[in-house]
Amino acid sequence: MSNTTTTSTSATKRPVVVFGPSGTGKSTLLKRLFADYPATFGFSISNTTRSPRAGETPGKDYHFLTRPEFLAAIDRNEFIEHAEFSGNMYGTTVQAVKDVADAGKVCILDIDVQGVKSVKETNLGARFVFIAPPSREELEARLRGRGTDDEKSILKRLEAARGELEYGDSPGACDIKIVNDDVGAAYKKLVDFIFSE
Ligand SMILES: Nc1ncnc2c1ncn2[C@@H]1O[C@H](COP(=O)(O)OP(=O)(O)OP(=O)(O)O)[C@@H](O)[C@H]1O
């Protein structure tokens, strides 16, 4: 499908894209949002080439595609983002985001800068929220404090943060920049923004 021939997203269900460096607190804020408003928001269902695991339902947990199908969808420019992990391909299509709006929910996308740029080339009509850390030092402290990454991964994330912060502050990159200093205050800003239309 091309971006111009698909059904348009309802104006009241514009997707919200949340981006910012790893460790700024995107998951923390979104977890709270989904807990407080379970019926309002949704995540898109990803596509993958990996096999379904026991208990997984196609079209609910993932859209399961063969590798040739996945590659053809890439060629048709259907993906907002895609990547390969451990020999399997994963990605989010424009249609998967529209499906969330069609189900009456606001789709929340937690994606990287490459994905943000890609969403801007679609007709999804998304709004963009840049979550920034109070400082580089604090970002490093949070990545270490989280305890989920080894030293190599932390340094890689901090290196990537440089470009992500630069992009977030560039003109037109986002509709709102939220500095996640006090988490309660940041959450309130996020909720106020999301419900502001
Ligand atoms: N305002 C805050 N003050 C202090 N610590 C915070 C704040 N917000 C989040 N944290 C903590 O910082 C760490 C990183 O947060 P989180 O995992 O939500 O980041 P993320 O942006 O989702 O990262 P990734 O992109 O890697 O998924 C977590 O340990 C979280 O508890």
Image (cartoon, rainbow, N blue to C red):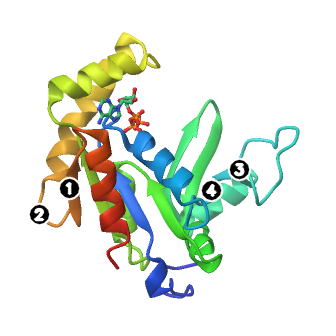
Between the C-alphas of marks 3 and 4, the distance is 6 Å
Disc number at residue 67?
3
Identified at 18% across, 43% down, the residue is: 165
Judge depth for marks 3 and 2 and give the one in front. 2
Quarter assignment of residue 39: bottom right
User: Above or below — where is 145 with respect to 172?
Assistant: above
Front residue (pair 78, 110): 110
- Element type at marker 2? loop
Q: State the residue position of label 4.
A: 71
Q: State the residue position of label 2.
A: 171
Judge depth for marks 2 and 1 and give the one in front. 1
Front residue (pair 28, 119): 28
Q: Are marks 2 and 1 in contact (CB under 8 Å)?
A: no
First along the sequence among labels 1 and 3: 3
Density class for disc 4 (Cα within 10 Å; few <14, some 14-19, many ≥20) is some
- Element type at marker 1? strand
Between the C-alphas of marks 1 and 3, the distance is 38 Å
Q: State the residue position of label 1.
A: 177
Is residue 35 left or right of 111 when viewed as pictured? right
Between the C-alphas of marks 2 and 1, the distance is 12 Å
Identified at 30% across, 66% down, the residue is: 193
Residue 36: % across, % down: 52, 55
